[in-house]
Image (cartoon, grey):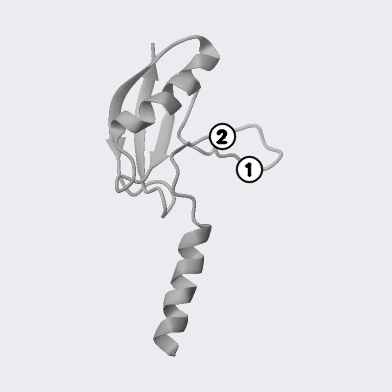
Amino acid sequence: MRFGGLVLLCLLVVGCAEFGAFEDRRREAGQIPMLGKSTDNHPAICYNPLWHSIEDLQPLADEACARTNRQAVYVDSDHFVCRLSAPSVAFYQCQ
């Protein structure tokens, strides 16, 4: 019985996690400065390498660069710097 409760709890927690890739444009509510790694010239896309490849992230990076009428070019990636459900980040440069 205890094991089943633990499994159910784990499923509920995982079900609430966001596994989709997203641009890291975090900021404190009501504040102008950004806390996330993404800027208009250098988008940063958080993702989980178990579910997404670098190629899957290109449309999100292009969308971020489209705000300044440019295209994204992949630069580098880093791991274990974003959320637990999306621990990796891919860095792009708008050109």
The residue under the point 41% across, 40% down is: 46
Q: Which residue is mark 2?
A: 34
Residue type highlighted by circle 2? Met
Residue 50 position in % (x across, y down): 30, 48
The residue under the point 35% across, 32% down is: 56
Residue 6 position in % (x across, y down): 44, 80
Q: Gap between marks 2 and 1, in whole Å?
A: 8 Å
> Quadrant of the image for the N terminus?
bottom left
Residue 28's disc is 1
The residue under the point 37% across, 31% down is: 57
- Which one is earlier in the sequence, the residue at label 2 or at label 1? 1
Q: Is residue 2 left or right of residue 26?
A: left
The residue under the point 41% across, 13% down is: 71
Residue 76's disc is none
Residue 44 position in % (x across, y down): 42, 31
Between residue 22 and residue 14, name the one nearer to us: 14
Residue 33 sits above or below residue 70 on the image: below
Q: Is residue 14 left or right of residue 89?
A: right
